[in-house]
Amino acid sequence: MAASVYHEKTSRKLLPILAACVPLVVAAFLIAQSSHRYRGDLVDFVSKNRSATQIVVQILSHGLGLSQTYSVHASEQLSFRLRLFQAPARLEDLAFGVALTTGRIDSLLAKLHCSITIAAVAACVIPGALWAGALTPLFVSAAVSHNSTMPIPAYTKASASIWDAEFQMEGNELWNRVQNCSGVGLITNCPVPALQGLLLSSAGSASTADGSPRLHSKNDSPQWSYVGRSYGVGASIGLSAATRGSTGSVYSLSFIEYGYATSMSCVYNTTSAYSLQLLTDTDIGPTSLSMYEAGGYLPNSFNNGIGKGTGEAYTVASSSSDDTNILAWSARAIGGDNYVSVGTGAGRYTEFNTTQCKVVFTPSTFNITANLTSKTITVTPIRRLDNVTSLLPNATITTNAMNSLNLLSRMSGTLYTSLLGDTLTRNLATIVGGDPQSALDLLNATVLGSLQDSFTAILGDVLVAYGAAQI
């Protein structure tokens, strides 16, 4: 036995020391790098390949843990052999020593010895688990400020041609020149008719049941969503290169933008001069076709002496013999005053009849925060620019936003039901939690609040579209 202990090869005796040095060096490296933050390609690779990264971590951690347990077992074996050389051992102690130094559980041992071997084997698992925790990369967010450039819309005479392309005044008449529209896909300088369906969808989901900020898609970049109101700003998000994806450790960005804060107040005007007037009623076989004029005076309407409906008049068709399935509105921006009036038939949408809304566009500054991870946009008004009458001398962008709201009604008529009425009703149903037609105690304030939300959502999306057309 003496020969087996003292004549062991030197490499055999040094191997446990070398095995212990490997994890020691790795531990020293990790401690030295504990305050270092990696960025760039390595972070992107780990973020996109987390399963593969964890496999590598498990292999390395088990290898380092095995190196440590081997070092301990090899040292125990040499020590145990030396002890046997110095003093005789009982058979029971010999079996215990062999089990302990080889890392196995022998159920034939005494209870105490068996418990010790179980604890020793369990302890061999701990180093691998500790190394797995030490090697696993951690994603941390640090508030790092980095200045960059972001293209944003400009409200100047040079860019006015974008939103002035569609609507043109000829005398007292407003003409929409759809042939002047341009754009690619969902980016257009004519929100109506190009974004007609999206605008109505936004209006139909403008409110939330509990009054919390709604989450709604950005029309030109559906992968992005606004949290709360858009206020007509943030058009560059999703369109500029800086917001098409997170790079390195940049997960959000924030910037200041000028725009118009839209506020609206709606009332029931029982003396409203805006209504539906029957023009013709014709039976064609089993089908009835009725033609109505939606028109009249708004508080800021033209009145050139020709008569009722001048400036606010257009034809609405219905397959019914009456006006029960008709809802229409007209919007006008004249002399800095902006109004919307709604008229309905005597049927499905009467809760919106004779409603009238005043719209105010206030030049303001906004803080825009874009989360590049969740693809969300949060707009926060900072302050009103009370000393500035308009960001643009003649404020044609807000005038054309109202013109777009007006054109949306004229282009959204249907024969069997009112697309406009169903849109407003759907948003109202969100607030009352059911079908507004069955809500006998429906408060006027609830209807007016729902109407305000719907019109505000449309105007906000129109202003965003005008901004996007500049990017």
Image (cartoon, rainbow, N blue to C red):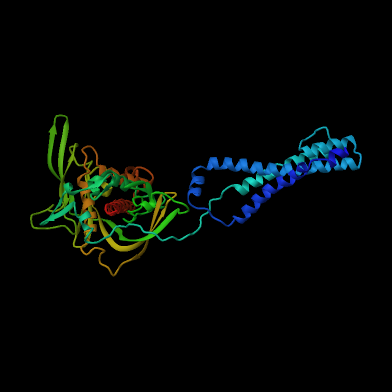
Residue 231 is situated, as x and y percent measured from the top left of the image, at: 33, 56
Q: Is residue 238 above or below residue 9?
A: below
Residue 290 seen in the current view: yes
Residue 111 seen in the current view: no
Kindly indicate the quadrant of the structure image that contains residue 286. top left
Residue 153 is situated, as x and y percent measured from the top left of the image, at: 29, 57
Residue at 51% in and 42% down: 49
Residue at 40% in and 55% down: 378
The residue furthest left is 306
Residue 84 is situated, as x and y percent measured from the top left of the image, at: 88, 40
In the image: residue 105, left or right of residue 82: left
Residue at 64% in and 50% down: 26
Kindly indicate the quadrant of the structure image that contains residue 151. bottom left
Observer-nearest residue: 188 or 447? 188
Q: Is residue 106 above or below residue 143?
A: above
Residue 225 is situated, as x and y percent measured from the top left of the image, at: 38, 49
Observer-nearest residue: 82 or 152? 82
In the image: residue 262, left or right of residue 89: left
In the image: residue 171, left or right of residue 196: left
In the image: residue 405, left or right of residue 285: right
Image quadrant occupied by the N terminus: top right
The residue furthest bottom is 387
The residue furthest right is 88
The mark tally for this picture is 0
